[in-house]
Amino acid sequence: MALSLDNLETRQVDPEKPLIEVDDLIMRYKIKAGDVSAVEGVTFTIHQGEAVGLVGESGCGKTSTALALLRLLPSNAEYISGEVRLNGTDLLRLNTDEMRKKRWKDIAMVFQGAMNSWNPVYRVGEQIREVLDTHFRGELTVDEQNQHMEGLFRAVGLPAEMIHRYPHEFSGGMRQRAVIAMALACSPDLIIADEPTTALDVIVQDQILKELKRIQRDLGMSILYISHDIAVIAEVTDSLGVMYAGKLVEYGPTSEVFARPRHPYAYLLLRSTPSITGPRRQLAPLGGEPPDLLHPPSGCRFHPRCPFATEKCSLEEPPLAEVLPGHRVACWHWEEVPELEEELKR
Amino acid sequence: MTATAPTQTKPLIDVIDLKKLFPISRGLFRAPTDFVHAVDGIDFKIAPGESLGLVGESGCGKSTTGRMLVKLIEPTSGHIQFNDGDYERDVANVSRGEISEFRSRVQMIFQDPYESMNPRRTVFDTVSEPLAVQKIGTIPEREERVLDLLQLVGLTPPENFLFRFPHELSGGQRQRIAVARALVMNPRFVVADEPTSMLDVSIRISIMELMTELADELGVSYLYITHDLAVARYMCDRIAVMYLGKIVEVGPTEEILAHPRHPYTRALLSAVPVPDPSFHRTPVEIKGGISKAINPAPECRFIERCPFAAQVCEENPHPPLIEVGESHFAACYRVDEI
Amino acid sequence: MATKETLRPEPEFLEEEANAAALEELVHGGDVIATPLWKIRLRLLRRSFSQNWGLFKESKMGIVGLIIIAIFGLMAVAHPILMNTVWDPRVYHPETGYDAVTTDYTIVEDGTVTDPLTEMEITEARIELNPNIRVGQTYSIPTQPAPPTFDGDHPHYLGTDPLGRDIFSQLLYGSRAAFLLGFVAAFTTVFIATTIGAIAAYYGGAIDGFFMRFADLILLMPLLPLLIVLSAVIQINMVLLGILIGILGGFGAEAIVLKSQALSIRVKSYIDAARVAGGGDSHIIFRHIVPNVLPLSFLYMMFGVTGAIGLEATLSFFGLLNVPMSWGIMINTAQSQGYLLSGTAYWWLLFPAGLAVSILAFAFFIVGRGMDEVINPRLRAR
């Protein structure tokens, strides 16, 4: 694939066409004590040029899902079933070499804490050059590589000449931009951003999120955001999925899910975030703890903490079904959830 | 909790021109010439029973301020007047003999629920440490007290938790124990340094609720240090915004959120993401990034990045806090014009 | 500011019943306040010990090492028992025993010797023994060192050494000496290293500098000449040697490693929390820093025993120590009498002692490696 700035700038995007289809993905970690059910039947679709968010708390499986897309899970992870289709091709059935070609060229990732993973003894440009050498061996001269990297830096709002600087000469926000530039290096169709702004200050966070939104819009890129920060997801995503204990419990357009959350966990989570707007202290407390994924609860995994749980919930797992247009919820009692709104007002 | 101007009764905490400078050594035998002005002359008051939020980005000096208030580090200059009934001291002057008395009145809750408890000591050891160190009470009496506190912070039944080790507990449970430990001596004043930032979102609320309830019940005041304005809003009646070692704005929480007067506060507020996709915020653009306050120039700290910087700002030293509303102060020369 | 995003599942959250059961274990039906605290702590200790033991058991290396140490321990214990019961001290004492084991030599024609240990050439016999001797006769000659014998009044299962002393007895005695030396040396090293490591780390600045410079001084001190000189002046026994090795070792690398461990603990928030709770310097050092350094200290103790045993054997072999008896002295005796390079002919002089040193030192080492997985959770298999 010939690289040029053009590849980076223009991209035909059809928001109706799916780019990645995750189909009933089941994945477990094998540890001494047994199998940890980390991703249990997750199904969702990322369309071309769309920003999708996966939201949930620690241990809910969102990072595992993201890593599964790139097949970068640790050696004790086992794919049980399901498909991950990129433009129709099932990534899970590819062999190692074929998958390696797809990584970074079709899907790239901004890892959690990547901004702190720059090797301090090499210039930033050299480290990005490693990526280019790996994927375009012998196809580009050093000058062409430099030109490309300067273009990447400009695309993320960094001065082009900084490719020749060392990581310690970058501030935190600039390092994160450089990581994004590296993710863009091979013009992928999808970028996975895992907690892209968690370690950054508020003002820098705002700048990075703006940059990512611009990249999505101008370059026609799809972005999968992984975050526990509900506010960030609210602002940058078009669709979002709420994960709990390895399961996708709600999925739909962001504005819809925020306006009308219909899964009890999603409702409580979305309404338990303090905000500088709206009522000061009308927040929904969530009792209990997330379950142990070695021995997950029977039936619906949220039932031990759910205010609507009935016996059915402990016996039968609710499917992720479309209950409102484009809006899927995995709950037997989704219709009763608006009652919580009344509870809260009291 | 009303946001009264703390001038009626003696304030619980009265910080006057507090400074902390850290030397940057340039060699083994040369006296340091460069200093990081972590805290550069701040003033604020906290009334009894009130919660003040100390808000800012990393490097602004809020953690350093908190640690000076509990005497973990000593100020370079300035005064921290602590007035608790008939016990009135300048924190910097508390002598070694008096330190136990001080520590029974001023306590701290730490940020990291994983690291703030010794992994080899039981919950009982950790919570009763202030009692043990000061040799208060017999062991059964201490056990009773710890059980009472565990009950108070919502760990029930408390007997089950008394002899657990930290690694057997979740983050939320550990943070409740941190609260219990802070309260075991019935302090008047607690410094909370980002106590919820390392917890899961759904647990944060329960910890914050716990802290507010206990504040009401026991009449404890907080200095709540955080970078998260939304959390500060939930917890605090008043907020002080810090930038590079200075307080740039202070006042009642809702007032500052509704009418921020300092350019930095405005930029900060406008950058906070809102968990409501229908809300459109308009970020105030400021240039550059935060720098370290090393040997800062005398003029306004914010001058490099301020969109309203003018000649008056260049010609004068860092502006003092000026009253801009009902107990609302901002440190800006141009505050009436912008 | 990030929450703990991990790929590993969260630690087990005990359910109510499990919580209650754990408490039951500690109070045995009584009221938790009525149960004395020391009893509770004892039971907690027992519980954590069995948990750690469970982890240790999984490392086969560690178990093998432990078994070997147990065997040598039995040997060490057996020696005084045997000396006081079955063995005649005049024969079996490891230092002063003597047994004139006689070997029968058959006289053969010159040039026809097949086994030098039981046959002798006639010319040599006529010169050495009796000029009137004839081919075919057998002659009993007291032999030192004698190969293993299993019958008679005084069997020597591993033979005798060039001075007529029973090797088996020496071996068992040496086991005692090795344990004594090993533990005294290792304990002294670790005690000193932990103490100065914790204090240097806590106070930093001038105190740290002082200890580090003092350590440099000690490191400069040449161990060998010091030991040689001392050996000449006083009788060095295992305990004294252990203390010496311990002192000289305690200021070296272990101190630095333990100091850095102590440093990493000093910056943790629970130290700040302890100070805010009112804890003074000694409270923090001895109740917080040292207990968290101790697991590492204990680990180094294991490796310290290995080093001490090996060191003593080497020094004794070179004849630099005048300890009365040890495995090293056994090898030294063999060497000084010229039997070292005799190959397998006089194997009993070399192999028992040499193997004993190697195997016991190795056993402590692999026990240490086994403990490493218990102490350092990151090394555990998932």
Image (cartoon, helix red, strand yellow):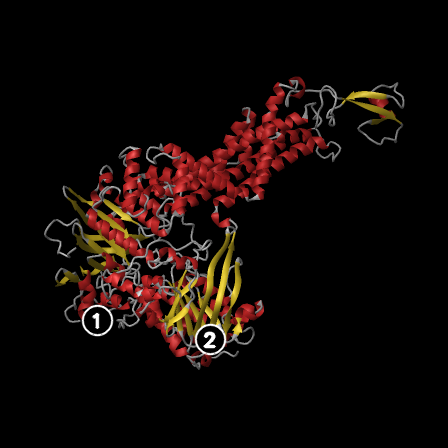
Chain at tag 1? B
Please tell me whether mark 2 sits on a helix, a strand or a loop. Answer: strand
Residue C381 position in % (x across, y down) = 52, 50
Residue C243 position in % (x across, y down) = 50, 30
Q: Residues within 10 Å of mark 2 (few under 14, many from 20)?
A: many
Q: Are marks 2 and 1 in contact (CB under 8 Å)?
A: no
Residue A46 position in % (x across, y down) = 43, 73
The residue located at (26%, 35%) in the rendering is: B136
Q: Is residue A278 above or below residue A217?
A: above
Q: In the image, is C279 to the left or to the right of C161?
A: left
**Marks 2 and 1 belong to one chain:** no
The residue located at (34%, 44%) in the rendering is: C271
Q: In the image, is A268 to the left or to the right of B120?
A: left
Specify the amino acid type for callout 1: Phe
Chain at tag 2? A
Specify the amino acid type for callout 2: Leu
- Report which residue position mark 1 lands on: B308
Q: How much space separates mark 2 and mark 1, taking CA atoms? A: 46 Å
Circle count: 2
Q: In the image, is C55 to the left or to the right of C333?
A: left
What label does residue C310 carry, if any? none
Q: Nearer the viewer, mark 2 or mark 1?
A: 2
